[in-house]
Image (cartoon, rainbow, N blue to C red):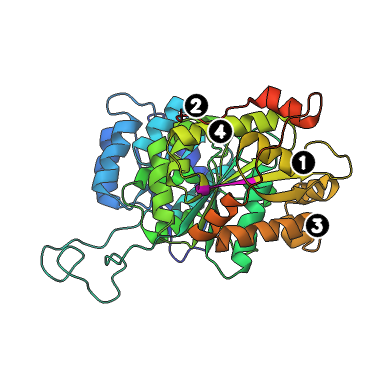
Amino acid sequence: MTTETIRILIVDDIPETRENLKKMLSFEADIEVVGTASSGAEAIRLAKQYQPHVVLMDINMPGVDGISASEAITQEVPFASIVMMSVQSESDYLRRSMLAGARDFLTKPFTSDELVSTIHRVYQMGPRTAPPVTPSGTGPLGGATPGDSRVVQPARRGQVIAVFGVKGGVGCSLVAINLAVTLAKRQARVVIVDTNLQFGDVGVMLNLQASRNMADLVPQIHDLEDDFIQQVLTPHDSGIKALLAPPRPEMAELVTSEHVKLILERLRQLFDFVVVDTDTSLHDRILNVLDIADRIVLVATPDIPALKNARLFLEVTEALDYDPQKILLVVNKVDKRVGGISVNDIQDAIKHPVTAELPADSPAALVSVNKGIPIVQADPKNPLSRALIALTEQVQQQQETAEGEEKGAVSPPAQAEPGGVRGQLARLLGVKTVVGNP
């Protein structure tokens, strides 16, 4: 609940729209319309005069349009949150609005409930007035003051763990979510970040009904304060926090590769572990994530297409000069009852150790996903849960020396048997898979 009346400035060049918005808000006890403007220029003047908490801004107006007015208001009244309104919902409008400082976007026509909930959301998120900067020795630039939230502290450096699936359907998100939840059970501060910005599943798989997402961080990307970040994160009852992907695919364009990099670097200062769920494409955004990561959990399944992609991924990372010990290969959906490609076969074929095997348990995994409850919470004694917990222990405790020992323990390649599983892997994956060596 809010503790003060939320001051609203309505900006639209159509008189009927302004009146309708006033009527929609007149029933809300904690909302007051302090002014209305018919142009961008008038909006800037009234924003400075009335100091509103929220500005409802039409994007298309003659003269000074909503984009230009929003940019000016963001500079003149920095604590005012702007909600852009438009009959157009194309990604270009969304991008321009966010770059101008807007905190949310409403597509006309919208309901009274949508309007009110948006106002409450952006009001709670801020931004709020920053502490004054003073040139003397009494403020953030001149020296620390007691209790100052902007005092420069030595940077923490949490572990960034990127979970990458070699193709769709291998269980990348399931591994990432349960890894994060298990780390939190060990009293670690954990955040999970969904960098599959178009079709992220973390929110659904955790049953989170969130109104905030990564795109909300973009307008303040170069000044991400702790309180603001915490407002954008969504808490889960397991103890982790989640930074979710935007709710609509077109909004993914609002978040660039550089934005993701800056966000992850900031989060690692606030958390012990930053678990990143990625998509399956090696584009700039995901390559930035992999560059930053201290560990890459590479998730594959024991089938030829997945193992072919795993080999290609390892070739790419070698070309990028990644330390092989940074990559932990996890083979998911292993069913020893049906035979097929064994872990030893996989290691021999792609020349990389397998860190963990996760047993196939489709019914339990499906129930977990559909209920939005991580399986390590819902059924910790399940074999899949126990394997995920064991994987977490390796991720958390693994040291460089232990990794070196593990790498040295890989069995030497066996002779391929024509017509057998090893022979098939040798033919399809190739005998020589190392890139950059003679």
Secondary structure under tag 1 reads: loop
Label 4, residues with CA under 10 Å away: few <14, some 14-19, many ≥20: some
Question: Label 3 belongs to which residue?
Answer: 383
Secondary structure under tag 3 reads: helix
Label 2, residues with CA under 10 Å away: few <14, some 14-19, many ≥20: few
> Can you give x and y, in whole percent of width and height, for residue 156 in the image?
38, 63
Mark 4 or 3: the one toward you: 4
- Residue 418 visible? The answer is yes
Nearest the camera: 327 or 435? 435
Question: Label 4 belongs to which residue?
Answer: 313
Secondary structure under tag 4 reads: helix
Question: Label 2 belongs to which residue?
Answer: 87
Q: CA distance from mark 4 to mark 1?
A: 20 Å
Q: Amino acid at mark 3?
A: Pro
The span picked out in magenta is: 325-329
Mark 4 or 1: the one toward you: 1
Mark 3 or 2: the one toward you: 3
Q: Residue at x 31, y 47 (%)?
A: 222
Mark 1 or 2: the one toward you: 1
Question: Label 1 belongs to which residue?
Answer: 342
Residue 418, quarter of the rendered image: top right
Which badge, 3 or 2, is on the more N-terminal residue? 2
Residue 388, quarter of the rendered image: bottom right
Which badge, 3 or 1, is on the more N-terminal residue? 1
Q: Amino acid at mark 2?
A: Val
Q: CA distance from mark 1 to mark 2?
A: 56 Å
Nearest the camera: 11 or 130? 130
Q: Amino acid at mark 1?
A: Ser
